[in-house]
Amino acid sequence: MPPPGIRARVRRLRARFVFQREMRLRLLSAAVLIPAVLLALWIGEIAFAGVVLLTGLLVLEEWMRMIGARAERTVVYAAFAGLSVLTIAAVTQSVWVSLIVLAVCCLAVGLVALVGSRASPKWCMAGVLYAGAAVVALIELRKGADGFGAVVFVFLIAWTTDTAAFFVGRKVGGPRLWRSVSPSKTWSGAIGGLLAGAACGALVLALLDAPLSVAGFVAAAFVALSSVGGDLLESAAKRRFAIKDAGTLIPGHGGVMDRVDGLIAAGVVTMVIGSLAAGETPAAGLLTLMGRL
């Protein structure tokens, strides 16, 4: 058996190789996906809604596979149909109507699962709620003249938080954030991601004519915190069903759900903040709340 010093060095070299390989895959995936999403976002609300629907369907498919309901075709098709109807409602109706449609879709899918399959109705409903919340939030945020900036605000916070947490966590290490749910996540990574996401969000708000302020930094920090929470929520769901990745579609990230978990939570929180503020759209409400000049 090799001496302990040699074994330790081999472990460090292996960890470094895995880190570098994962980073290459992440960068390659980002180079392909991010420009495509931003292009659809720039083209307009309908194009972006199409990308959101496609993403929601992929997330829902991975959720059904995760809970063991992928073979229950009736339930899966009902969930897909519900998400498609919800997308139309989100594009054409107010956020409150969309939320009612989302509730009806959840109940309908739960009923289909209860009557005609062996799938768990509550977990099928949870999947529709999870994917549907993302669809409603992102489509609502894109509405209006301020929509492009509001979605960029959410995207950049989520991406910056995730990337900074990855780098800081790997380089600094330290105590685990929630070992039983996600053994690889550390407190150092979460704090680093939170600070980086908050700073990025505050900068984006400034570029959108909202003055740099403590309120802007706090709001961005809250959205960044929700992104970290969304990541943990998805990790808890995967741990519940004893899987490592939701899928294998995106190299370096696993499945689509693994990539958008933080984005979903950040989008929902931002939509709620903007909807509760005064404004014709959630995006306008967000910037008004931040003291747009």
Image (cartoon, rainbow, N blue to C red):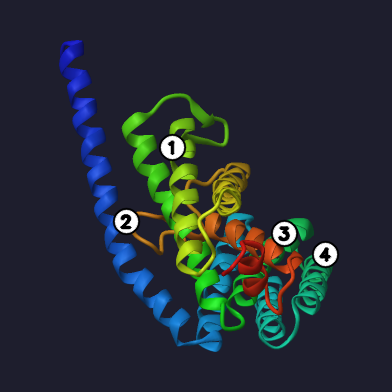
Which numbered disc, 4 or 3, marks the residue that appears first in the sequence? 4
- Residue type highlighted by circle 1: Gly
Sooner in the amino-acid sequence: mark 1 or mark 3: 3
Question: Which of label 2 and label 3 is nearer to you?
Answer: 2
Question: Residue at horizontal 42%, vertical 75%?
Answer: 37
Number of disc labels = 4
Where residue 59 appears, as percent x and y from the top left, is 56, 65
> Which residue corresponds to mark 3?
126
Q: Please tell me whether mark 4 or mark 1 is closer to you in this view.
A: 1
Q: Quadrant of the C terminus?
A: bottom right
Identity of the amino acid at label 2?
Arg
Q: Are marks 4 and 3 in contact (CB under 8 Å)?
A: no
Specify the quadrant of the image occupied by residue 261.
bottom right
Q: Position of residue 196 (x, y in %)?
A: 43, 47
- Cα separation, mark 1 vs mark 2, equals 17 Å
Amino acid, disc 4: Leu
Ranked by sequence position, the earlier of labels 1 and 2 is 2
Q: Position of residue 2 (x, y in %)?
A: 15, 14
In the picture, measured across the screen, residue 239 lies left or right of residue 5, that is right
Residue bearing the label numbered 1: 189
Taking the image as shown, residue 195 lies to the left or right of residue 172, namely right
Proximity of marks 2 and 3: CB atoms separated by less than 8 Å: no
Query: Which residue is pictured at 53% across the width and 32% down the height?
Result: 177
Disc 1 and disc 3: Cα gap in Å? 28 Å
User: Which residue does the numbered mark 4 point to in the structure image?
Assistant: 114
Helix, strand or loop status at disc 3? helix
User: Of circles 4 and 3, which is in front?
Assistant: 3
Q: SS of the residue at dot 1?
A: helix
239 is higher (above) or lower (below) than 110: above
